[in-house]
Structure formats: C-alpha cells, structure tokens
Amino acid sequence: MPLEFPILIDRLFRQNVGYWQANLEGLDHLGGSDYGELLVNYLGQSEKQLVNAAYQIAADGKYELAASLLEWSTARFGRTESIAKAEHLVYEKLMEKNQNWDPFKYILYSAKIGEESLVGDTRSNQPVRDPRCGAVELRKG
C-alpha cells in the first residue's frame, strides 16, 4: 500500500492540473505568427536578419531550432525565396541526421521540402538505390 500511494497522488495531480504545468507553461497557445510578430514588431528583426540567424543556428548543428525560426519567419513574411532556400538546407540536414535512426522524421522532413523519400520506378522488380542514404530496395510492381 505505501508504494501505491505516490502513484495515486501523481495520477490525481495530472487529472486535476490539466494541460498546463506549475510554471504556467501550456496555459496559452502561441502560434508561429505570434513568434514572428514578436521577432519583427517588438525585436526589430528583418527577414534577412532572421534568415541569417537561421543559417548560423544550423551551422551550430541546432537544426530543429533553425527550422522553428524559419517557420515563424514564414508565418510573418510568407514563403519568400530566401526563406525557402534556408528551409531546404535545414530540412536536408534534418533528413541526414535522422535517415538511419528515425524513418518517420525522415519522411516528414522530406515531405516538408517536397522531396520524394522513395526513389525509383515502383512498377518494376529492379533494385533501386536511394541517392541520399545509399540504401538498396527491391521494388515489386
């Protein structure tokens, strides 16, 4: 009985607290346009500055953060050419990072930039090599 009591308390706490947490996280939902507004209207950042920051963040290997920054920038400025180029680079890096470990993320990131995650003719029985990861797959038609 003593071991089950803390579990009961934890369950009751989760049921009564809801989605937000003790530090008020999750209480209000802020979207990409809200963060874009913050960066541009209140911090005075231009599209060029945000894209350059995304490249610097990506150079540091923080691809998820760079992708988030580009999402916020897109919500504020639309999908401009400079944002699209930076986004393509960042999502390619995320694809490289996840290609061997998380196929679901790989597929989602490749879809985000409009790349096919499966390569080749699916009607033939010929082996097909994916140029990004070198994997060989036999496709059946």
Image: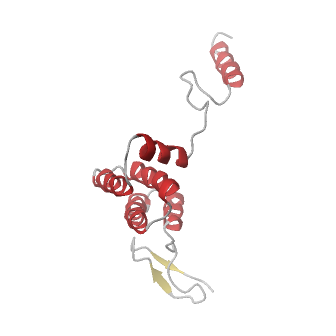
Can you name the residue that lies furthest to the top here?
2
Figure colour scheme:
secondary structure
Q: The C terminus is located in which quarter?
A: bottom right
Horizontal and vertical percent for residue 48? 34, 58
- Left/right of residue 45 with respect to residue 7 in the rendered view: left
User: Looking at this view, is 60 or 86 the one in front?
Assistant: 86
- Left/right of residue 131 with respect to residue 4 in the rendered view: left
- Left/right of residue 60 with respect to residue 86 in the rendered view: left
Horizontal and vertical percent for residue 119? 50, 79
**Hey, which quadrant is residue 83 in on the image?**
bottom left
Horizontal and vertical percent for residue 1? 69, 11
Residue under the point 37% across and 61% down: 93
Work out whether residue 100 can be spotted. Answer: no
User: Looking at this view, is 52 or 96 the one in front?
Assistant: 52
- Residue 141 position (above or below residue 107): below
Horizontal and vertical percent for residue 13? 66, 19
- Residue 42 position (above or below residue 103): above
Work out whether residue 49 can be spotted. Answer: yes
Residue under the point 39% across and 58% down: 97
- Residue 18 position (above or below residue 82): above
Residue under the point 39% across and 67% down: 85
